[in-house]
Each structure stands twice: as C-alpha cells, then as structure tokens.
C-alpha cells in the first residue's frame, strides 16, 4: 500500500431501499466482501447516505482503525461528497474514500439478479484494490472576486443585475444592442394578466442605468474570457455609438435637427415596420437614453459633406463625435451570468406560409409592434396596404414541434397567440381564428385566460395551418389570404379567407449561440440551448463553475420563469461570492517537472487553457486552479510526465485488474 | 584465472548490431576489457556453452544479453545465463522490448515459414523443406532449436535486472552503464540505464517546435526536403522524440532523420506505441471523421511506426492466434 501502514478497508454496501437490494444480493456481497484482502469490516445497510449510515463509517474507523473506505451505492454525482464528509469526520483524509456505483451501473440496468450480484462483486473488488493506492489530498482555496459579469440585457439580465446590485455587488451588464430591454421591450401587454409591458419593464431599465453598482455597456461584446471560477478576466469590445455618453444629456434634439426631415430608413427595433433617421433612438424609453448614429446611412460618414445640423444643435455639449473608435475594456469578475435570450424562428424558412411574399402575413413579433401604443402605427392595427383587418388568422407552432424545423415546443407561443388574439380583437373588432395543434396553457392563470378567450368568441380550429395562398374561389375571397388547414375536430380540409395572418413563430437559440458557448466554455444541448448542470437540481448552473444561466438562453420560457431563473442565478452568484473562497477539487493533473521534456504536446490540448510553456525552464506548467481534471493531457503526454490525482496509473491499473479478476 | 569480475555477452534474436556496438566502444572497449574478464562471448571469443554450464551459479558478475527470444535455444541460454549471473542485463531494444524481430508477431509461425522458405522471390527450395527441429538418420538424432510462435522480450522469459536501451545502444550509454555496474553504484533493480526524460529534452531542434502544433497530413522523410534546424514534427514528419527516452544525444534528429523510438518509453509509460500513437493523434487538426481518416492514411504502417521496437513488450503483444506449442526438438544432450 501507499506507505500508510497496513491496508484496513471498511466496505459498505447500500440497499438504497430496494433500488439496489431488489436486484443485488447485498447480504451475499457483504459476506463475500470480508474475504477480500485488506477488508476489515464489510457491512450492508439500508440507506448509507442517512445519518446512521454515515455514522457507521465514523464508528468503524474509530473502533477498527480503518484507513480506507469503500461505499458501494449510487452515483458519485449524488453522494461522493456525503461519504467523503463522513470519512473526514472520522478523522481520515476524505480522499481515502472511493465510491462504487452499483445502482446506475448495475441494479438499475440489469434484471438477472445473480449476474448483477457478480458484477457488484467485480466492481467492488476493483475499488478495494484501487483505494489502497489513494494518496491523501488537500483541497485548494482560491479567493473569489466579488464583481459579476452579466451578458445580455433582456428582462433576465436586467433582473439579475438589479438583484445583485441591490445586494451591494458590482455588476457589469454587457448588451450588444444600443438599448437594454430585450424582447420584452417590444411587447404592448403581457400574458396572462395583460399588464402593460413597458409599465413594468421601463422602471427596471432606468433603475439599471441609475444604479451606482451597475456598469452598463451597450453596443458591446465580450470577446475573451480567461481564468476560472472566482477569477475571470474578461475583455469587452465596445462599439462606437458616435455619441459621447458622458457629455450627452439625452435631450434628443439632434434627432429632430438631423438634415433628414423625415425618417427614411427601416427601423430595426420595429422590425422594419417603421422608419428612423440615421441618428435615432431605438424607442422612446430606451436605456441608455442616448441617440446612436448608424454609419451606413449617415451622410457625414458616407460623404463627409453633411451640414451636421445635429452637431450644431448639440452645440456646447459637444456630445457627437464622428471619430469615436471601438474601445476595449478589461475587467475582473468572479462569476458570470449568461442571459443572452433567444431569437425568433425565421418564417421565411417555411415558404408555404408566404411570409415575405404576401404583405399581410406578419410574424407574431411584428404583430406585437403593431399593437404597441409606442409602435410604428401608434397601436393601430393597420395592414401594409393601409386597410384595417376584418378577419385575422393566427397560426400557432410556426417552426416549433416540427421534424423539419425545430422539434421542441416553444412554450410561450400558445399563450402569446391567445394574447394577440385578444388584443387584435380589442383593437380592431376583427373576427379571429386561432389554428393550433394543441393548446398548451400549463402556467398559473393560463387556462383561465384561455377560457376567457373562448368566451370572447375567438374561433379555435384544431389543425396546424398547412398553407397560405391567394387563390380566390369566388369574388368575396378576392384580395384575401386563404388559410388551408385540416380541421382535425371535424375531419375536414378547410379554407379560411382572412385579411391578416399572424405566424406565431417559435423561439430558438441565437445563430451565434455556438460561439458564445465556446467563448464561455460551457455546453449546449443538441438543439443549441445552453446546458444547465442538472435539469432538476442545478438548473441555473453550467458545467463550468462560476458561470450561470438565466432566461431563454437556457430554453424557451416566459417572463415570470425568466425572472425567477434570473433571481436564482443571482442567488447562486451571491452564494459563490459570499463563500469568499472556492475550494478546488484536487483531482487535478500535475507535471513531474524533472521528467518533462518540454515537447509541448500537451499545451494546445487543454480545453481549459490550463497548461502553459515556461520558456525559462523549457517545461510545461499546469495552473492548478484552471485544471478541471479532464485527463486529456495525462493521456497525451508522450513521456508519461503528467499524472493526475485520483487517477494515478497504479490506481487505474489496479482497478482494471480488480474488475477483470473473477474470483 | 584473475579475480577480475567475470562478464558474459550473448546474442539471441538480433541482427548483430549490438555486438558491433560493443566493439564500437573503440578505445573504451579496452577499459572494459581491462576491468573485467570476459568469460563468454560467442561472437568474438571461443568459449562454449558447456564452459558456462560448468560455472558455479552466480559466478558471472553480469551477463549482457542482446536480442529477443524466438527459439528454444535462446530461451535455454537466457535461463542458463540467469543462473550463472548476479546481474542480467537486457542489452539493446530487442532484449528490452522485443525489437525489430518482434514485428514478426504480426504474423504466425506458419506464415513466416511460408514466406521465408517458399514464397520469397529469392528462395530456392524445390523440395519445399521447412525447418524441422528433429531429424533422424540411421538411428542418430539431430536436433535444431525449436521456433516459437511468438517473439518475446528477455524479461518475458527470465528475470532481468537492468536494461540498456537502443538499437543499438550508443557507446556512451554502454560505457556509463558498465561503469555504474562495476562501481557497485547500480540503481534500483529493473531500471533502464539511461536518462528518464524524453528525447526532445536534448534535441537541438526543440526550441523550434511551436506551442500550438497541429497537422493535416503526415510526411514520410523521403517525401520532403527536411529543414535541418526545424522540429521534425513541425515539418509534418512523425518524430517519436516526445515519447522516446533520451540519452542517444539525438543522433537521428541531428542526422536529419526523425526519432523512431529505439530507446523505448520512459519509466512512466507502460505501452510505448499506445503513448506515441495518442500523442501523435492529438496533433491532428480536424474534427471531421472523414478528414481524420484521410490524415491517418498518410501513416501507411502504424504498427511498424509506433511499435517498431516494442510490439512484444506492448499490452497488445502480437496478432491474435490460437496458442500452439513450439516445434519440439530432441532433449538437449548434456555436454
Ligand atoms: C412574440 C412573443 C411574445 C411574447 N409574449 C410574452 C408575454 O406576453 N408574456 C411572457 O411572459 N412572455 C412572453 N414572451 C416570452 C418572452 O419574450 C421571454 O420570456 C423573455 O423575453 C426572455 O427574456 P430574456 O432576457 O431571457 O431574453 P431576451 O428578451 O431575448 O433578451 C436577451 C438580451 O441579450 C442580448 N444579447 C444576446 N446575445 C448577446 C451577446 N452575445 N452579447 C451581449 N448581449 C446579447 C439581446 O440583445 C437581448 O437584449 C413572448 C415571446 C415572443 C417571441
Ligand atoms: S507533453 Fe509531457 S513532456 Fe511534453 S511538455 Fe507536456 S508535460 Fe512536458
Ligand atoms: S519532436 Fe523530434 S524533432 Fe521535435 S523537438 Fe522532439 S525530438 Fe526534436
């Protein structure tokens, strides 16, 4: 054994109720365990993770002078820390413990009881042989930087930022658009309560701007992040707004004074439904309250010969700067919250709905703008051809629940479709048809809202809209959009002529989500949503410590859920900061410096950039705090000069021999 | 008889290069000769097996055995020398790891006989005779050593105390090893008597290897004009320097040729070829399976490349075969 005197192993087999004991003969395994070389105590117990179960370990260590502990139970993911704790409580180094997973790896996946019992023995033999070679290890402590970076200033990012800032932490909020607010800023009302989106959102937006603990950077991108939990160094690129933030008072007189008397260019915030000037503010309550100059359309940028009436009116304030350059900021933070949200499905991908071809086919987001009192039509629902719609069709699930596009349910579309139905009816008095596959209203107050809509006389047709065309069958259909649908309740194909179609487009990950994922070194689900560490128990954590998720970047959800998640992410971040130190798992790789030949094979392989080449010594060096113990370099080092705690060659070879040595 | 320590040299399945290496010690060989009494060296001195058999157990201070074990006779001699020696040294790659002859483990004995005695273009064998270990003629029995199915390294046959690596070992390595053994300052049993760091450490090209080296094709030395200064791997030539124990003073890379791994792995690596392969594979610059296959196609003989000197000592050992006993010889007659 590893220089620790005689091997004295305590072996514990957990029943896990019937989860394990139902398939594995735990009594037989415990009796057999006593015959293993080095095993002094071998027991089975109903729930090893319970207090009395853990106490068994503590008592045995004290009474029987055990020096190694093996527990055969569930996954280390669940209880490794528990049993390491018990081992430490008993006075042993916690890393003299090793866990065998006889539940997920054995009882849950086998039916043949005898074979499962034999397999448990093989796994246990391997662990007992391995644990003999365990070394005492210490967890390292690293201080945590209290500042937090939040990426994305939608409702999730805003809420997380305010929560943290109110708790006294400094927050850097990085948003790539000229204003914060995200999608919610585009809505008029929110389901199911129909409260005014701006009334609840804009106070939070201004609070962000005013808060002494929040540094808000709009028109900005994170371009680099280095370091590890508690100690990230982040580079942020700030794109020019051509307005000097500190000098601008937000009077917006410059926009008025622009040489363009009329707004001429399609306005991004209104999805092209309205127009803006080259100098503009995305919407009246935008935060920060600063204009932005679009260099693509500004005459001064195009020709250098503009009268610059904007500069004239700005006068002594001198806040307009055509020479403003991109700048870079470098900040240190201890944790990061990603709140980059979603993008809506591009309806052009499904040409049979005619979006982009028939002017009166809108997306739901466009419909939100049309209804919005601050929108391009001041809240009047007027079609592109100037008419007011008398009949409107709302098609659910566009780009959702579809093998050919996105397979997932976007979760909010049923509800916002109901909301739009209600609001359009309210604004126009039109007859409304909703085409749905299923109505999904599982949230608080949602089903009631659906009932209300049914009572309001909105038509619901069960069937996914199949096609929109403009082929009239009789003169009354002239100029109409014909929705073709299979009404599955009556079992008939129907044609429903309407004036306006709203496509309820689904939610999907941003096109650049993969880049963001790589930048922050986190994982994505196969669909492209950022992956939480555990779907139930760690929903806002990622597999990278210190990086948390909030809002729709993790998956489709509504505003209440986004806010709840943002609060949770802020709380996780606070808990991390207040723990003051991070304890780093000692399963890290280390280089045998004397042995390293400096061949550099390992350097580019590390997914966490933990290895660097030290020119002075001509050897590689691992930053222990960055190392996640993935083992890539250990396997790759051609001269075997990298080893890894808890995965030493002897430990692994003994484990292999143990598992293969059938009694 | 002097009381100088007695040593023996012996060769098994080897090419003779190791014997040359001893002679190559040049004036150094005289130091060795002066310090020891060579009691057995079939290649150079006329001693017979029976002379060794007549010795007391442990009479030899050290035996230096080169070559792998392929025949029954080699195995017998390995056992004999083991008994008679205080220290048994595996000399050269073949004894240490199985060496080039060990690549024969990619074929079965029958395949080898077929090729060598029947199919090779240079073979003239109208009767189709194959090696036999037993030949009777008029009541006399003539026996030849039996040919095993598998080539083994020396330590797979007898207990080995030390290893001197190399194909062949370099004069400096030999001299240092012999001095260490004679001075009684020998290291821990089982050691390889050479530095325990990989070759890159002493390679003059080392500094030219970029930190981030990735490749989309491997080059064989004959395919390119090799830059004499630049790291060979950085030029796309598979150099096993990163995986190979140093001590040769980078003879090959100084000679503008890649390291082929003859000094074997460091003490920390169990399977040389697997390590060399994983290190080489890790610099492939692609995540696309098809493209990776294309890149790998530029390595036409991976086993010969990565296991050139160490197939018998690897975890793989040989191409899978149903185990068969060696061809039987006559019981060796005493004397
Ligand atoms: C048509 C429609 C109607 C809806 N109606 C309702 C409703 O009535 N009620 C309700 O509860 N929910 C509704 N929702 C859902 C609601 O939009 C979301 O729940 C909410 O917007 C999620 O907020 P978020 O902050 O996670 O994401 P977002 O609102 O998408 O905000 C993300 C922010 O991050 C920024 N960003 C993105 N990537 C980066 C980057 N790399 N760097 C910096 N910044 C970045 C974006 O510019 C954006 O400002 C609706 C959704 C749609 C599509
Ligand atoms: S791979 Fe091994 S020998 Fe090469 S630089 Fe890294 S640690 Fe050193
Ligand atoms: S890889 Fe080969 S050429 Fe490059 S430094 Fe190492 S030994 Fe020298």
Image (spheres, coloured by chain):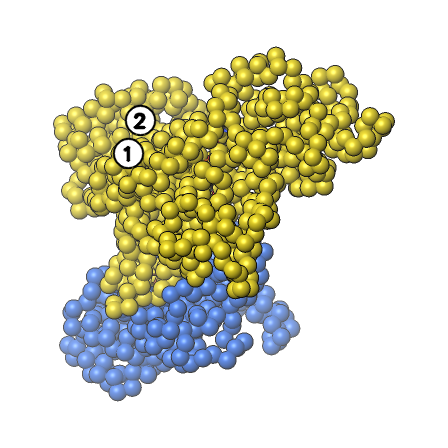
Chain colours: A yellow, B blue
Residue B71: x and y in percent read 43, 64
Task: Say which quadrant the C terminus of chain A sits in.
Answer: top left
Q: Nearer the viewer, residue B191 or A174?
A: A174
* Residue B36 tag number: none
Q: Is residue B1 above or below residue B112?
A: below
Give the residue at mark 1.
Answer: A166
Tell me which residue sits at (19%, 34%) in the image: A88
Q: Mark 2 points at which residue?
A: A13
Q: Reading the chain from its start, which is encountered first: label 2 or label 1?
A: 2
Residue drawn at x 35%, y 31% is A568
Name above or below for residue B133 compared with residue A661: below
The secondary element bearing badge 2 is classed as strand
Q: Count residues near mark 2 (Cα–Cα under 10 Å), then give few for <14, some for 14-19, many for 20+.
A: many
Chain letter for the residue marked with disc 2 in the picture: A
Direction from residue A627 to residue A517 in the image, left or right: right
Q: In this view, does B64 lie above or below B286?
A: below
Q: In which quarter of the image is the N terminus of chain A?
A: top left
A595 lies left or right of B263: left
| Residue B333 position within the rendered picture, expressed as x and y whole percent measured from the top left | 38, 65
Which chain is indicated by disc 1? A
Q: Can residue A51 be seen in this view?
A: yes
- Give coordinates of residue B219: x percent, y percent: 51, 71
Q: Which of B166 and A277 is in front in this view?
A: A277
Q: In which quarter of the image is residue A492?
A: top right
């Amino acid at each position: 054994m590893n220089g620790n005197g005689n091997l004295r192993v305590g072996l514990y087999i957990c029943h896990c109720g019937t989860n394990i004991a139902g398939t594995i003969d735990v009594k037989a395994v415990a009796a057999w365990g006593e015959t293993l070389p080095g095993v002094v105590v071998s027991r089975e117990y109903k729930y090893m993770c319970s207090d009395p179960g853990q106490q068994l370990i503590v008592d045995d260590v004290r009474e029987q002078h055990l020096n190694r502990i093996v527990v055969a139970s569930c996954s280390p993911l669940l209880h490794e820390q528990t049993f390491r704790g018990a081992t430490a409580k008993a006075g042993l180094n916690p890393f003299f413990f090793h866990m065998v997973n006889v539940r997920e790896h054995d009882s849950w996946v086998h039916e043949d009881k005898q074979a499962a019992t034999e397999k448990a023995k093989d796994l246990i033999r391997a662990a007992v042989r391995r644990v003999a070679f365990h070394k005492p290890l210490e967890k390292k402590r690293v201080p945590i930087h209290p500042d937090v970076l939040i990426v994305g200033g939608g409702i999730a990012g805003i809420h997380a930022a305010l929560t943290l800032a109110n708790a006294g932490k400094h927050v850097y909020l990085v948003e790539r658009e000229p204003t914060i607010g995200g999608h919610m800023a585009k809505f008029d009302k929110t389901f199911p309560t129909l409260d005014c989106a701006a009334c609840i959102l804009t106070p939070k937006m201004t609070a962000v701007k005013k808060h002494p603990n929040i540094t808000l950077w709009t028109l900005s991108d994170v371009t680099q992040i280095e370091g590890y939990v508690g100690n990230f160094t982040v580079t942020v690129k700030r794109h020019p707004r051509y307005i000097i933030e500190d000098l601008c008072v937000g009077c917006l007189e410059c926009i008025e004074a622009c040489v363009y008397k009329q707004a001429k260019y399609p306005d991004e915030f209104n999805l092209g439904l309205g127009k803006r000037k080259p100098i503009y503010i995305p919407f009246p309550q935008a935060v920060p309250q600063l204009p932005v100059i679009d260099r693509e359309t500004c005459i001064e940028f195009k020709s250098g010969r503009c009268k610059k009436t904007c500069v004239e009116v700005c006068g002594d304030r001198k806040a307009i700067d055509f020479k403003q350059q991109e700048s870079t900021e470098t900040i240190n933070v201890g944790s990061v919250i990603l709140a980059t949200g979603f993008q809506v499905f591009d309806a052009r991908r499904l040409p049979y709905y005619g979006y982009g071809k028939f002017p009166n086919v809108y997306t739901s987001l466009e419909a939100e703008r049309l209804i919005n009192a601050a929108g391009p039509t001041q809240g009047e629902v007027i079609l592109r051809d100037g008419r007011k719609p008398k009949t409107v069709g709302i098609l659910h699930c566009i780009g959702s629940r579809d093998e050919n596009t996105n397979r997932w349910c976007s979760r909010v579309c049923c509800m916002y479709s109901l909301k739009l139905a209600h609001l359009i009816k309210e604004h126009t008095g039109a007859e409304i048809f909703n085409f749905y596959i299923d109505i999904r209203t599982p949230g608080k107050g949602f089903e009631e809202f659906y009932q209300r809509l049914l009572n309001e006389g909105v038509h619901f047709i069960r069937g996914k809209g199949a096609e929109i065309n403009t082929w009239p069958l009789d003169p009354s259909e002239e100029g109409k959009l014909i929705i073709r649908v299979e009404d599955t309740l009556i079992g008939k194909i129907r044609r429903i002529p309407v004036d306006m179609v709203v496509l309820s487009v689904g939610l999907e990950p941003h096109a650049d989500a993969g880049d963001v994922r790589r930048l922050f070194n986190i994982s994505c689900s196969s669909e492209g949503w950022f992956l939480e560490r555990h779907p139930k128990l760690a929903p806002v954590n990622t597999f990278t410590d210190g990086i948390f998720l909030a809002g729709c970047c993790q998956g489709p959800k509504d505003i209440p859920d986004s806010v709840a998640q943002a609060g949770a992410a802020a709380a996780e971040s606070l808990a991390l900061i207040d723990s003051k130190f991070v304890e780093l798992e000692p399963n890290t790789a280390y280089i045998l410096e004397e042995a390293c030949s400096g061949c550099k094979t390992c350097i580019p392989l590390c997914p966490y950039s933990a290895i660097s080449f030290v020119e002075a010594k001509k050897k590689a060096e691992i930053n222990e705090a960055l190392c996640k113990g993935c083992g890539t370099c250990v396997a790759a080092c051609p001269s075997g000069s990298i080893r890894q705690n808890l995965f030493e060659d002897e430990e692994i070879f003994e484990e292999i021999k143990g598992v293969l040595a059938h009694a | 008889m002097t009381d100088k320590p007695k040593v023996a040299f012996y060769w098994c399945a080897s090419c003779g290069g190791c014997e040359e290496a001893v002679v190559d010690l040049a004036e150094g060989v005289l130091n060795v000769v002066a310090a020891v009494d060579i009691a057995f060296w079939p290649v150079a001195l006329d001693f017979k097996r029976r002379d060794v058999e007549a010795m007391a157990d442990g009479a030899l201070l050290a035996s230096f055995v080169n070559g792998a074990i392929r025949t029954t006779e080699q195995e017998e001699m390995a056992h004999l020398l083991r008994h008679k020696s205080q220290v048994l040294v595996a000399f050269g790659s073949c004894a240490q790891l199985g060496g080039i002859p060990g690549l024969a483990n990619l074929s079965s004995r029958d395949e080898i006989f077929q090729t060598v005695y029947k199919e090779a273009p240079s073979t003239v064998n109208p009767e189709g005779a194959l090696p036999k270990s037993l030949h009777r003629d008029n009541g006399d029995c003539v026996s030849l050593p039996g040919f095993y199915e598998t080539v083994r390294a020396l330590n797979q046959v007898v207990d080995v105390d030390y290893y001197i690596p190399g194909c062949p070992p370099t004069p400096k390595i030999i001299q240092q090893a012999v001095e260490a053994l004679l001075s009684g300052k020998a290291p821990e049993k089982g050691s390889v008597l050479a530095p325990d760091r990989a070759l890159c450490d002493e390679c003059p090209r080392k500094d030219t290897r970029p930190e981030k080296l990735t490749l989309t094709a491997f080059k064989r030395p004959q395919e390119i004009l090799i830059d004499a200064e630049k790291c060979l791997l950085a030029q796309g030539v598979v150099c096993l320097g990163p995986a190979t124990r140093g001590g040769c003073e980078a003879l090959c890379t100084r000679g503008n040729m890649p390291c082929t791994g003859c000094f074997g792995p460091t003490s920390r690596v169990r399977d040389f070829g697997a390590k060399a392969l994983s290190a080489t594979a890790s610099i492939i610059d692609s995540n696309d399976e098809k493209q990776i296959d294309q890149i790998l196609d530029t390595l036409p003989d991976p086993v010969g490349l990565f296991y050139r000197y160490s197939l018998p000592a690897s975890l793989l050992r040989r191409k899978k075969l149903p185990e068969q006993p060696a061809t039987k010889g006559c019981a060796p007659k005493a004397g």
